[in-house]
Image: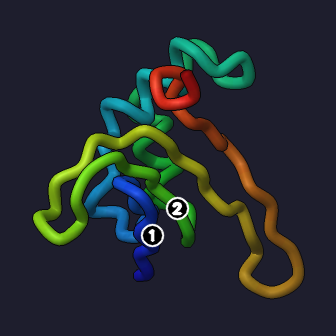
Amino acid sequence: MDTWVNEGFFISTNKQYLDVDTIHHFLSQEAYWSKGTPKEVVIKSIENTPLCFGVYKGDISNRVGEQVGFARVITDLATYAYLSDVFICQVIVN
């Protein structure tokens, strides 16, 4: 698990930090490619993905951060990988 920090934000591959409610809300309500996806499917997709990235606004040293982005890597762990379900919340973009 890795973590990168920059100007009040951090990115982590630690799945323990992921806010499933935030991820599910975005994917099921805002993302055109996955509207209506049940929460159970989002949870299973995260569990079965070997590498997920969470983007957080906050302080990693205190383990305090609001999830503002997400991406996961779909791979066979040998020959290919692609990035899926990539998003940054609109509040942060503005």
Query: Is 87 drawn above or below residue 7 in the view shown?
Result: above
For the point 50% across and 42% down, the residue is 69
- Quadrant (top left, top right, bottom left, bottom right) of the N terminus: bottom left
**Spatial distance from mark 2 to mark 1, Cα to Cα?**
6 Å
Q: Residue furthest left?
A: 62
Q: Amino acid at mark 2?
A: Cys
Q: Earlier in the sequence, mark 2 or mark 1?
A: 1
Task: Count up the numbered dots.
Answer: 2
Query: Is 70 drawn above or below residue 4 in the view shown?
Result: above
Callout 1 crowding tier (Cα within 10 Å): few <14, some 14–19, many ≥20: many
For the point 52% across and 61% down, the residue is 52
Secondary structure beneath dot 1 equals: loop
Query: Is 84 drawn above or below residue 41 in the view shown?
Result: below
Q: Residue furthest right?
A: 79
Callout 2 crowding tier (Cα within 10 Å): few <14, some 14–19, many ≥20: many
Q: Which residue is mark 1?
A: 13
For the point 36% across and 63% down, the residue is 15
Q: Quadrant of residue 76?
A: bottom right
Residue 81: x and y in percent read 80, 69
Say left or right for 94 vs 4.
Answer: right
The answer to whether residue 38 is visible is no
Say left or right for 66 vs 86.
Answer: left
- Tell which of 56 and 78 is nearer to you: 56
The answer to whether marks 2 and 1 mark residues whose Cβ atoms lie closer than 8 Å is yes
- Tell which of 66 and 53 is nearer to you: 66
Secondary structure beneath dot 2 equals: strand
Residue 63: x and y in percent read 16, 63
Q: Which residue is mark 2?
A: 52
Q: Residue furthest bottom?
A: 78
